[in-house]
Image (spheres, grey):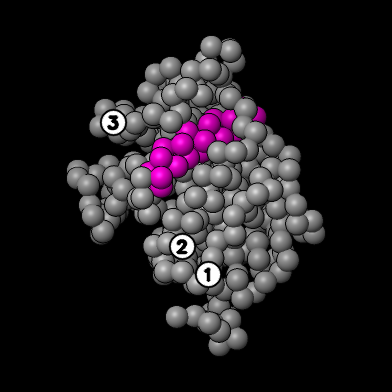
């Protein structure tokens, strides 16, 4: 895991043209962080201990306790401190999100955050990435029954291999097929295809369509998780990883204005939701939000708590020894 240093404006070169005979190697790193995870496809379904990542691959598809396919599919980006938004409201955030209680055990708190996550993306006015009425209708009817199969896992891994080999056009075409609402309807593929559209990997850039696929992935996986919560599964169901990843990437969209208007309040809310669902990159990003007052009031105590959460998962930020000062540790277990 690389250490993140100072925030800098994105100066990365544009992605290679689909017609380029030998595109440069692309590392799969989260959209606006310098950290990266090693990701690989699992052979089983671990209960409590995830498999140890191997250093031989840049992309690792793992299965959490719920058994769903998740991804840390990332692209290189360095970020700049943004001007603070002093407003506490956002039209991109439902007004009736429930407050998550602090005085409850970890399992109950996790379940409440997941319920809040499903409401965050499930009740929002999300537009469909498809262009016809029939496809839009199909996407809505299928979203609650999306199932990730072993064949989907294999096809996604194949698309990743195409990408790593520099065949971006072939890789993205496979992601697109798996993301099709009338086909596999795979939420993870919808996230990956959305990222390909955002950055022009083997396809013409279309940031607005990218957001629509990310929104669809979030809403699709939220429908699965809502059913799991209703069934009493406090740790979530088969699409928790996809939901968390989609929420994180939507946070990036609102933060940077990728396909949507910049919305610091929405970005912070999406980051904080993904952070409380266990995403270490989101923990670092929402910690930065509270440190700088981006979409919220400055709160160094909250910032320190989220930075510590990320560090516990091995995602450290350079120069953050201040987060362990006594005045920022008050009330910690």
Q: Residues within 10 Å of mark 3 (few under 14, many from 20)?
A: few
SS for dot 1: loop
Q: Position of residue 77 (x, y in %)?
A: 57, 48
- Residue matched to label 1: 102
Q: Is residue 156 visible?
A: yes
SS for dot 3: loop
C-alpha distance separating marks 1 and 2: 7 Å
Q: Judge by depth and name the residue closer to the eye, 214 or 65.
A: 65
- Residue matched to label 3: 149
Tell me which segment is drawn in magenta: 208-230
The residue under the point 58% across, 25% down is 128
**Mark 3 / mark 2, whichever is N-terminal:** 2
Q: Residues within 10 Å of mark 2 (few under 14, many from 20)?
A: some
**Mark 1 / mark 3, whichever is N-terminal:** 1
- Residue matched to label 2: 109
Q: Is residue 265 left or right of residue 224?
A: right
3 vs 2, front mark: 2
């Amino acid at each position: 895991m690389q250490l993140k240093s100072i925030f800098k404006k994105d100066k990365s070169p544009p992605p290679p043209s689909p017609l380029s005979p030998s595109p440069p190697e692309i590392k799969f790193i989260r959209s606006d962080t310098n950290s990266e995870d090693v990701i690989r496809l699992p052979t089983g379904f671990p209960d409590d201990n995830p498999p140890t990542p191997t250093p031989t691959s840049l992309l690792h598809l793992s299965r959490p306790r719920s058994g769903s396919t998740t991804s840390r599919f990332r692209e290189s980006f360095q970020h700049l401190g943004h001007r603070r938004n002093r407003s506490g409201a956002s039209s991109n955030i439902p007004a009736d999100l429930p407050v998550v209680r602090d005085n409850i055990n970890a399992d109950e708190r996790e379940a409440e955050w997941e319920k809040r996550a499903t409401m965050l993306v499930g009740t929002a006015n999300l537009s469909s990435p498809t262009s016809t009425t029939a496809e839009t209708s199909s996407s809505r009817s299928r979203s609650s029954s999306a199932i990730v199969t072993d064949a989907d896992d294999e096809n996604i891994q194949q698309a990743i291999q195409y990408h790593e080999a520099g065949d971006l056009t072939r890789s993205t075409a496979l992601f697109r097929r798996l993301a099709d609402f009338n086909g596999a309807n795979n939420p993870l593929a919808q996230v990956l295809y959305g990222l390909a559209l955002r950055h022009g990997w083997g396809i013409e850039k279309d940031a607005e369509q990218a957001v629509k696929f990310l929104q669809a992935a979030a809403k699709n996986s939220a429908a699965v998780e809502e059913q799991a919560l209703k069934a009493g599964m406090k740790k979530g169901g088969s699409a928790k990883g996809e939901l968390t990843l989609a929420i994180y990437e939507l946070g990036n969209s609102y933060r940077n204005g990728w396909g949507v208007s910049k919305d610091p309040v929405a970005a912070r809310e999406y980051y904080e939701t993904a952070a409380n669902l266990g995403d270490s990159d989101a923990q670092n990003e929402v910690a930065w939000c509270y440190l700088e007052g981006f979409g919220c009031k400055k709160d160094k105590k909250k910032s320190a708590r989220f930075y510590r959460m990320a560090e516990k998962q091995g995602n450290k930020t350079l120069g953050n020894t201040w987060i362990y000062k006594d005045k920022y540790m008050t009330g910690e277990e």
